[in-house]
Each structure stands twice: as structure tokens, then as C-alpha cells.
Amino acid sequence: MQKRGGRRMYRPRNGEKWICAKCGGEIRELPFEPFRDEEGNLKKPVYHKECLPKK
């Protein structure tokens, strides 16, 4: 975890990759810790900032 501009940034655990659900590119850090299920898998999709679905 690092701080950028006063905000915490989270990185994948060792040996883990976060993949953007839209473009398929690797995500190196997020401003939040993604939710995980009991096995440690991500519960919800994660996206690059540019790929976030429009509301």
C-alpha cells in the first residue's frame, strides 16, 4: 500500500494480477482494497479509471 496525494493506493498481492473487466489490461494499483470471497478471489470486477462504466 502506498499513498499518492494523501490517498492510499493498494497493489495486488504477490503473485496476483488484477485484470480490467473492460479492456483486459493489468491494473497495478487501486484507490481501494477489492472485496474478496472466502477463497480469496475478487468478488466484483475491477476497472481502469478510463474504463469505468458510465452511469
Image: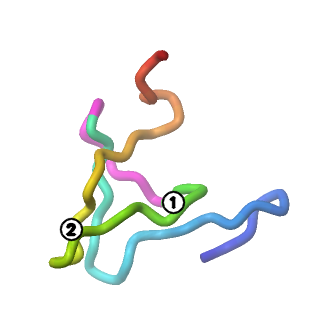
Work out whether mark 2 precedes mark 1 in sequence or the reverse, and give the earlier one.
Answer: 1
Whether pointer 2 and pointer 1 mark residues with C-beta atoms closer than 8 Å, the reply is no
Residue at the spot of label 2: 41
In three-dimensional space, the C-alpha distance between marks 2 and 1, rounded to whole angstroms, equals 17 Å
- Residue type indicated by callout 1: Glu
Instruction: Answer few, some or many: residues within 10 Å of disc 1's Cα (few below 14, many 20 plus, some between 14 and 19).
Output: some
Look at the image and name its color scheme: rainbow
List x then y, in percent, for residue 53. Answer: 41, 23
Q: Which residues are magenta?
A: 22-28
Q: Determine the main secondary structure of the stretch shown in magenta.
A: loop
Q: The N terminus lies in which quarter of the figure?
A: bottom right
- Residue type indicated by callout 2: Asn
Report whether 20 appears left or right of 10: left
Secondary structure under the numbered disc 1 in the rendered image: loop
Q: Is 24 above or below relative to 31?
A: above
Q: Is 30 above or below relative to 14?
A: above
- Residue 25 lies within the magenta run: yes
- Residue 3 lies within the magenta run: no
List x then y, in percent, for residue 52. Answer: 45, 29
Comparing 23 with 45, the one in front is 45
For image coordinates 83% across by 62% down, the residue present is: 6
List x then y, in percent, for residue 4. Answer: 76, 61
* Residue positioned most to the right: 6
Report whether 7 appears left or right of 6: left
Q: Quadrant of residue 10?
A: bottom right
Task: Give the foreground label among 2 and 1.
Answer: 2
* Residue positioned most to the bottom: 14
For image coordinates 30% across by 68% down, the residue present is: 36
Secondary structure under the numbered disc 2 in the rendered image: loop
Report whether 19 appears left or right of 6: left
Instruction: Answer few, some or many: residues within 10 Å of disc 2's Cα (few below 14, many 20 plus, some between 14 and 19).
Output: few
Image disc number at residue 29: 1
